[in-house]
Image (cartoon, rainbow, N blue to C red):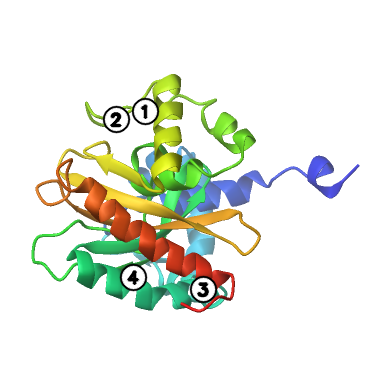
Amino acid sequence: MTESTQAKPSQAVLDAIGLLDAFEQDAGERTLAEIARAAGVPKASAMRHLKALALTGFVIHDPARKAYALGPAILTLAERFLAQQPSVHACRPLLAALARETGETAHYAVLQGRDVVYLDIAESPRRIRAYVTRGDRQPAHCMASGKAILAHSPNAVVDAFLEADIAQLTEHTITSEPAFRAELEATRARGYGVNLSEWVDDVGAAAAPIFSGSGQVVGSIGVAAPISRLNRANADDVGLIVRDCAARFTDMLAGKAA
């Protein structure tokens, strides 16, 4: 038996991670009951896990307010992760240049399960802009980044992705398997993916794939903007800019001159 087949994942660890994931981006402090309910963990178990997480600095407990918040140990782990990702540092000048050229928020994302995770961003210089944060996770099927990566992923990855239902988040979200496969084909043909009000009504995006030196897709570079500034009228123009930026990053990863 291999290690992967004989060892079962620790439910306690999975529960503790679920509790951490229950702290939503804008929620701030949360009570024990709120955290347990969001994570689907019994309150008694949640309390034990939260005590351990508080001792190690992953959460902060305010006894007076009977509330919990994320602790500084989360940031320490995040910084360690980023330090081990040289591609993040290499990408930053390109993201900054892309944000300046398009005037929109630029981002570097990777696929994790059914979500895209944003590893780095460069903010739009405009007051009104799309809001993307480092570490943010969003459903891949309705994101330009997700489409760009999936369009160049092995068939087995796409097949596994489509085994689960595709959630409809807006009236523009592509939810049928044939239509989604056709969208991936179109994305692959033009070299970039688009999201026009498929995630939320007022956001548009374009993203292009990044490849490793061996030719495997490893992520995407894209921009997001209010739909009033990135829409069907200019999505192709923005997509070509993004595609060129992603190609430069791919050359960098392959050791070619930028």
- The kind of residue on which mark 2 rests is Thr
Q: Mark on residue 167?
A: 1
Q: Amino acid at mark 4?
A: Leu
Labels 1 and 4: the sequence-earlier one: 4
Relative depth, front residue between 79 and 58: 79
Q: Which residue is mark 4?
A: 95
Which badge, 3 or 4, comes first in the chain's sequence? 4
Numbered tag placed on residue 173 in the rendering:
2
Q: Are marks 1 and 2 in contact (CB under 8 Å)?
A: yes
Q: Which residue is mark 3?
A: 252
Cα–Cα span, label 4 and label 2: 27 Å
Q: Quadrant of the N terminus?
A: top right
* Quadrant housing residue 141: top left
Nearer the observer, 93 or 68: 93
Instruction: Determine which of the numbered discs, if any, sits on residue 228 in the image.
Output: none
At label 1, the amino acid type is Ala
Residue at 58% of width from left, 76% of height from top? 255
Please report the residue visible at 31 percent of the width from the left and 55 percent of the height from the top.
240
Mark 3 belongs to which amino acid?
Answer: Met
Tell me: 101 left or right of 19.
Answer: left
> Which badge, 1 or 2, is on the more N-terminal residue?
1
Labels 1, 4: front one: 4
| Mark-to-mark CA distance, 3 and 4 | 13 Å
Contact flag, marks 3 and 2 (Cβ < 8 Å) = no
CA separation, marks 1 and 4?
30 Å
> Is label 3 in a helix, a strand or a loop?
helix
Q: Residue at x 29, y 74 (%)?
A: 97
SS type, badge 1? loop
Quarter of the view holding residue 43 = top left
Q: Earlier in the sequence, mark 3 or mark 2?
A: 2
Judge whether residue 173 can be spotted in this image: yes
